[in-house]
Amino acid sequence: MKFALLSLLLPVFGSSSKASNDNALPTLNVHIVPHTHDDVGWLKTVDQYFYGANNTIQHANVQMILSTLIPALEYDPSRKFTYVEQAFFTRWWNEQNDKMQSRVKKLVKNGQLAFVNGGWCMHDEAATHFMGMIDQTTLGHTFLQETFDYQPTVGWQIDPFGHSATQASLLSADAGFDALYFGRIDYQDLNLRREERRVEGLWRASANQQEQSQVFWGLTGSYGGNYGPPSGFCFDANMCSDQPMMDDPSLEDYNVPEQVANFVSASWDQANEARGTHIMMTMGSDFQYENSEAWFRNLDSVIKNVNEYAKKGLIEADPNARFGDIKVFYSNPEQYTRAKHKDNGDLKWEVKTDDFFPYSDCEQCFWTGYFTSRAELKKWERVGSSFLQTARQFEALDSQTGAKAGSTFDSPNHKLDAAVGVVQHHDGVSGTAKQHVAFDYAKRIDVGFKAAASYVSDVLKRVMASNGNVAPLEFSVCQDLNVSTCDVSQSVDFSQDELVVGVYNSLSHTRSEVVKVPLQEQAAYVVSTKDGEVESTLVANTDLMSDDAAPYTLFFNAEGVHAMGTKFFKIAKGEQKILEDVAAPKVATSRKLRGMGLSLSSGIKVDAGDYEVEFDDSGVLKSIAGLPVAQSWGYYTSFDADRSDVLASPQEVGDYLAWTPGVPGTCLPGYLDMEGDESRWLRDSEGQNSGAYIFRPTLKNEPLSVLKPNAKVTSVTQTDLVTEVHAEFGDWVKQTTRIVKDADYVEIEWTVGPVPTDDGIGKEVITRFDSDIQSGETFFTDSNGREFLERQLNYRPTWDMEVFQPIAGNYYPVNAAIYVEDDEHSLTVLNDRTQGGASLKPGQVELMVQRRLVNDDSRGVGEPLDETTGGVTPYPPYGEAERVGDGVIIKGTHRIVVGKGRQGAKKARENMEQMFSPLVPLFANKAASDDDESIHGFSALGGEELPEQVSLITLTKVAAEPGTFMIRLAHQYGKGEDEKLSEPASVDLAKMMPFGINVKKFAETTLTGNQLRSDWDAKKLQWNGIEQGVTQTGRDFDDGTKITLMPMEIRTFKIVTDSTVGWTVEKK
């Protein structure tokens, strides 16, 4: 057999050196990049993945990957390896002794062990907010900087399911990355790019920063839509079944000629789809290299034998006559990027300016469902990320830690920082993990939140004491305010005590908003500050989600809450003689509101001050500020291949194809069997179910199943401060539409669930707003809460798309806002978590708020997205993986803003920060007899006020550098979004500092603070694009301590002060 095989291979090798090694043609350089992709939670929790636990679900053991890697690299100094996820690496590192740590440092120093991305995880790009992306990347970069003096230069987003403009500009170019590599793009786009040799290029994703924020991008996985090795060269001892390199000629199964021929053929094929003389082969995949030596021994043989065959002239030039020779060697993504840059002089790269959403891997397979999947986890992640900013500000204020040197990982907020960092993972906040893993994510945030909240309360007490308050109070943070629950406020005995609410504003501008306080009894309450009484009103709660929820909510106007500061409010029960002189709050719950000028039978009109809001007699929104805006609720039914009314012969939906774990390639989807480590099998796309990743309605143009409003239960509550219209839709959707005095938005607070599936049909629940705006087929969505991107129905900017799913294929991630507009009006909808959104008709906006499904979509998670209150029982052999409890109920908020023509972005900008960073009330109980005249508020920004369009989005102590703080300043408007606020803005860093702190020096850094910006600018690679230009940055206009920010620019600084006690505050 051996001789017969060799005879078959003879045509592959040349018979003469001259014929096979044509010096007129260039050499192809093949970069072998060993790597592992270690999900920070997916089928198992992050702990289980690290230790190798719960292997009945999936075999994976990260600590053994790292433990076997080190001696494998030490065995041969030519070997190299690339690692990503610092959530795993730091855990492993902390378990090593000094000797092992020294060995690792040597490998990092000599370039054998490289880090790409370098974040806590490989974050998602669709479901994340830019602050979460920045924070998790900074956390990982800080560890690498403190431990190895290492700065990653390459982004490595190989597994996320679509790629955002913010990732390319902010999280790559501004983070010190020369290049960004990923595996997944839409299959239509991918096929065309492979045909036209456009699998790499320049990505200039920011319309505001343009080439200043561009990054070189490229595909991994031999351009097959994945990040694994070429076919036939997967050598993992646990997860691969490809033939090893049997390179002893005395063996009967000696296979070097065959393997060399196959490898060379794969190299020519890959090179023919790319430009330049270098290609990268990613050697590794999900949780591989647990036995690192198995991989390296085989790769050593591939490299050795291919190079020897080439040296001997036994390899013919490639069939496309582009290369005459081949050279194979160990490499890493940074080395590969620099090699591609050497080709830069002869090449001009195509420039991409849009993003890579939405992603599909076959005709019926749009990965747009995960934009909404696990809606409650998405909200909880946003709450944790927002509160982390507050906690960091308080740490900067803390006199006990302000001047001490240490590590970021000693921070009292590290639990929350690490928890939020883990959940940014592309199977975390995306909602695509198993149920028990989703619970673990939520638990981590809960533990971190509670620790950070306790710390914030302690620091507040110390700040109050230093601020001249005689008797600082014990404040508590209530994390369940969204469901009207707060132990402190509900337990106050107002007959003898008072409730003090310290309202903290984490934003860098003074703001005024209405605050909600859950209370247990109906009474006439008086809210006051040290300056006098505050307008308030008590409203009965109509939607109690639990027995612990308060029956009443007190609304009060928190006016003038100081920038990065606290204002204190006292709530007491009023006396009758006082109530005679003031407007007593009223509780209005009757459906028929006499004397209020409201008539349900003729509809409802609410005067909001500058505009009027109109509802129909069912309590459904009808118009805002004269613009007809009709709201509706409904659902799409989820495609189910096993339903007889969907497919006549579900057993004959197509051929079955093998799929390598972690290497989807170009195969079509569908796990039919996923027990243990058995092979996965795929069926064609006509049988594609809707699932955690995939959104597929039963019919391609399925009409919405509308939930009819129930007029019989409609009620209205009207006060001078707040008007609420309560409505129900069907049996499982409730909403309160709230119009707040002097607010430019209409707030809709909705409750959805349990979504019924007793009929065996999954449901994709949406809310829709139809207006008369003539927006055509154009709408706009934000990119991770930063820049807005124009979207067009059934259109992709870089290829002619063939439309297979006109609903699912037009969904985009909405992280903060979506809007439509024309020359007369704009309609903007803001959300409190990421959701999938679209505009399927002119003037229409729809957002998917919840999903409950009955099938898996065959993308690996192995269970339907069917969230229940009790979760899932253990998997075999310990249980039967059965659902427990009822379907979950979720609650959320949308803000609806109507503006003038072409004001969609402007109206969004005015509300986006407030939605991400709501006011944080802290509650304390005090005796009514105690003197409260000395309860002073404070501001951490006592210096010069920032320009209106500039925000201080980060204030944190640099743990390793005493008296040093890291700040990030962000221009919050894009070009053309506002006549005034879209202009560049300047800030004097010395004057913005709080009173009592002097700036000794300051320096601008890259986004994550791991190197000086000037150092990065001096060494970053310059690329030749087809469309070159010069765009100015704020640095072009800096003058001493006065710095400038251009539209949408974020700049990061480390400021060294003379403070020995931390960031000081000004008494207010």
Image: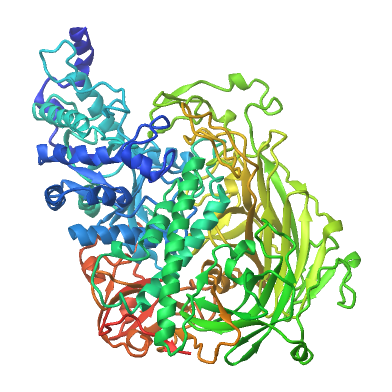
Residue drawn 55% across the image and 48% down it: 374
Image vertical order of residue 534 relative to residue 728, above or below:
below
Q: How is the image coloured?
A: rainbow
Q: Is residue 727 above or below residue 664?
A: below
Counting from the top left corner in percent of width and height, residue 633 is at 73, 53
| Place of residue 278 in the rendered image (x, y in percent of width and height, measured from the top left) | 23, 42
User: Between residues 177 and 982, which one lies in front from this camera angle?
Assistant: 177
Seen from the viewer's position, the closer of residues 207 and 588 is 588
Q: What x and y, as percent, mark residue 529? A: 59, 87
Q: Which quadrant of the view contains residue 134?
A: bottom left
Q: Is residue 471 visible?
A: yes
Residue 683 screen position, x and y as percent: 52, 25
Within the image, what quadrant is residue 835 found in? bottom right
Of residues 205 and 1068, the one nearer the viewer is: 1068
Q: In the figure, is residue 1030 to the left or right of 746? A: left
What is the number of callouts on the image? 0
Q: Residue at x 49, y 41 (%)?
A: 436
Residue for point 20% across, 63% down = 1019
- Residue 919, relative to residue 308: is it above or below? below
Q: Quadrant of the N terminus?
A: top left
Residue closest to the eye, 830 or 398: 398
**Res. 130 in view:** no
- Res. 389 image quadrant: bottom left
